[in-house]
Each structure stands twice: as structure tokens, then as C-alpha cells.
Image (tube, rainbow, N blue to C red):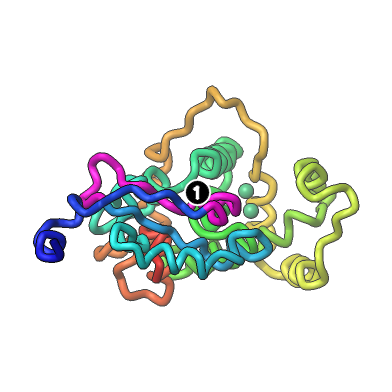
């Protein structure tokens, strides 16, 4: 019997097992992918919730239970391509992340912001900045997204573009009447009317206002739209020329060029890797 088990491929060993009720009750079924029909084997893949996503939620208490689940012979931790995600090319370019990884709402938001910037006749640097200003929200993390985004893009865009993206996060909270920018109504809905930005963002805003590139960052906030016509479809190809002139695509592909931020792009390629 034991010989039969060792000589059979994994696909024949699978016996679907019921998830313990404690994991189901904690909502962790969402982190466990049952084998897809076209999977390379028939093993269940567990996605360990990233610490930043699990903290403060029931998921953080169940890491031990997920580790125990992964010891079942028909269960593994997710490593490499998640079959539920489109496969990325070997040498991904910026467009691949837009089309194959970013959530539809974030992709639309970025593309529409860039289109508004172009329609407003703004400089290409600003159009480029608008196109990628929330790239961290789209593919990595929302908290501190301006800073994550600026770092991810740093090696590939003009220094002014990366700076503007970093600072737009703070500038969004502070009106500038001289250019007609007011506190976003959406933020009142999202964070409540009493929300007040923390001190470090106040300091960032003050410093950014005195910087020579202030207006570049301010222009991102002014083209940072929230409401749009769902019937208006903006194609990434509309900005291929801007990207070609303003984004230094590495020949090895984003994630594989050995840059100090390559790991951030790889995290978007394989966001569910256990390690
Ligand atoms: Fe933003
Ligand atoms: Fe935005």
C-alpha cells in the first residue's frame, strides 16, 4: 500500500478534505485555493495572509492553523504562479502590470487621471506621474502608498516624477486655494468629517510646499479624480508614447533587473508566495 502511494503522482493521491471549522469560521477559506481543473497537480494551495493584510483581523490568529494545514500531503503553500492569476511574461513591462495585475478600479483610476492630465495640456512628466501615482495601491499596499510608489518607480522615472508621487499622498489632505484645490469630498466619506491627518503628513506637506517641484506633485492631486463615467474606457495604449519617453524599461524585465526595488515588482508578479 505504501509503495502504491509513493509511486503515484500527487494528482492521484488527493482526497478532498474538509477544512477545520475554526478556519472556516475565521473566514480563512478565502486564503485557500482548491485545485483548479487545469492545475498542474491536484493539490490545494494555501496563501498565507501577508502580515500587513492580516494584522488587526481574525486572520492573524490563525497562522499556526494554516501551517498545520500545509502539512497535509495534498496541501502546499502557494509558491510561484497562482493559477488564479494571469501568467506574466518572462520579462514584464509596465503595461503587463496594468493589464495582468492591477485591479480594474485602480487601473481605470490611473488611466483616467492620466487622460485628464493630457486633456489639460500638462507636461509629459505630469502625465507620466498621474499614470502611475497610485501604482502601490493598484498592486502592493495602500498604506503609505505615495512612498511605496515613489520607491518602486525611482530607478525608472525622472527624479521629479518619483518625488511628486511620494508627496502627492500628503498634499491630498491639504487645500491650496491659489490653484483651486480643495479637500477631497471623497475623504470625508472615506475617513469621516473629523479625520485629521497625522503630524508627519503635516510636516511633509509644509516641506513639499517650499520645494521647487511642489507644483508637479500638486498637479497630480488636481488630476486625481474619483468619479468618472464607467462608459469611458481608457486604453493603456493611449500612453505608450509617454511611457516610452518617460519610463526606462529594463531589458531583463521589471522584477529581474537586479535594481534595489526589483523585489517590489516581483511581489506583484507572485503576490501570494509564502516566502
Ligand atoms: Fe494617491
Ligand atoms: Fe489617485
Q: Is residue 129 among the parts visible in the rendering? A: no
Res 221 visible:
yes
The residue where tag 1 is placed is 30
Cβ of mark 1 under 8 A from ligand 1: no
**As displayed, is residue 37 above or below residue 172?**
above
Answer with left or right where residue 58 lies relative to residue 15: right
Residue at 23% across, 57% down: 90
Q: Residue furthest right?
A: 194
Residue 23's quadrant in the figure? bottom right
Which residues are drawn in magenta? 21-42
Rendered residue at 59%/60% (across/down): 59
233 within the magenta span:
no
Residue 202, position as x, y percentages in the image? 81, 68
Q: Which image quarter is the N terminus in?
A: bottom left
Residue lying at the far front of the rendered structure? 1
Q: Name the foreground residue: 215 vs 222.
A: 222
Residue 184 picture location, percent across and down: 78, 45
Numbered disc total: 1
Side of 250 relative to 274 (left or right)? left
Please tell me how crowded label 1 is: few (under 14), some (14-19), or many (20+) other residues with Cα within 10 Å. Answer: few
In this view, the residue in front, 140 or 93, is 140
The image shows residue 223 at horizontal and vertical percentages of 64, 44
Q: Is residue 242 left or right of residue 207?
A: left
User: Residue drawn 21% across and 54% down?
Assistant: 13
Q: Residue 37 colored magenta? A: yes
- Residue at coordinates 85% horizontally, 55% vertically from top-left? 195
As drawn, which residue projects farthest toward the top? 231
Figure quadrant of residue 253: bottom left
Pinpoint residue 145: horizontal percent, then vertical percent.
60, 61
Front one among 47 and 52 = 47
Q: Quadrant of the C terminus?
A: bottom left
Amino acid at each position: 500500500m505504501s509503495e502504491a502511494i509513493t509511486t503515484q503522482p500527487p494528482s492521484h493521491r488527493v482526497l478532498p478534505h474538509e477544512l477545520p471549522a475554526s478556519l472556516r469560521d475565521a473566514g480563512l477559506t478565502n486564503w485557500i485555493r482548491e485545485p483548479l481543473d487545469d492545475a498542474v497537480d491536484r493539490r490545494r494551495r494555501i496563501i498565507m495572509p501577508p502580515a500587513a493584510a492580516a494584522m488587526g483581523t481574525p486572520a492573524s490568529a490563525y497562522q499556526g492553523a494554516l501551517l498545520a494545514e500545509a502539512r497535509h500531503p495534498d496541501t502546499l503553500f502557494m509558491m510561484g504562479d497562482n493559477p488564479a492569476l494571469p501568467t506574466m511574461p518572462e520579462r514584464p513591462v509596465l503595461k503587463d502590470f496594468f493589464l495582468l495585475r492591477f485591479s480594474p478600479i485602480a487601473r481605470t483610476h490611473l488611466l483616467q487621471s492620466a487622460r485628464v492630465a493630457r486633456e489639460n495640456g500638462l507636461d509629459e512628466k505630469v502625465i507620466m506621474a498621474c499614470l502611475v501615482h497610485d501604482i502601490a495601491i493598484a498592486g502592493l499596499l495602500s498604506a503609505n502608498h505615495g512612498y511605496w510608489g515613489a520607491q518602486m518607480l525611482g530607478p525608472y522615472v525622472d527624479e521629479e516624477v518619483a518625488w511628486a508621487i511620494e508627496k502627492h499622498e500628503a498634499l491630498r489632505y491639504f487645500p491650496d486655494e491659489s490653484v483651486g484645490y480643495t479637500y477631497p469630498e471623497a475623504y470625508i466619506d472615506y475617513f469621516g468629517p473629523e479625520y485629521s491627518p497625522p503630524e508627519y503628513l503635516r510636516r511633509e506637506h509644509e516641506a513639499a510646499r517650499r520645494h521647487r517641484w511642489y507644483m508637479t506633485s500638486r498637479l497630480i492631486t488636481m488630476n486625481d479624480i474619483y468619479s468618472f463615467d464607467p462608459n469611458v474606457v481608457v486604453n493603456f495604449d493611449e500612453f505608450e508614447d509617454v511611457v516610452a519617453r518617460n519610463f526606462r524599461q529594463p531589458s531583463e524585465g521589471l522584477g529581474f533587473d537586479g535594481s534595489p526595488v526589483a523585489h517590489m515588482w516581483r511581489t506583484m508578479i507572485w503576490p501570494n508566495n509564502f516566502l
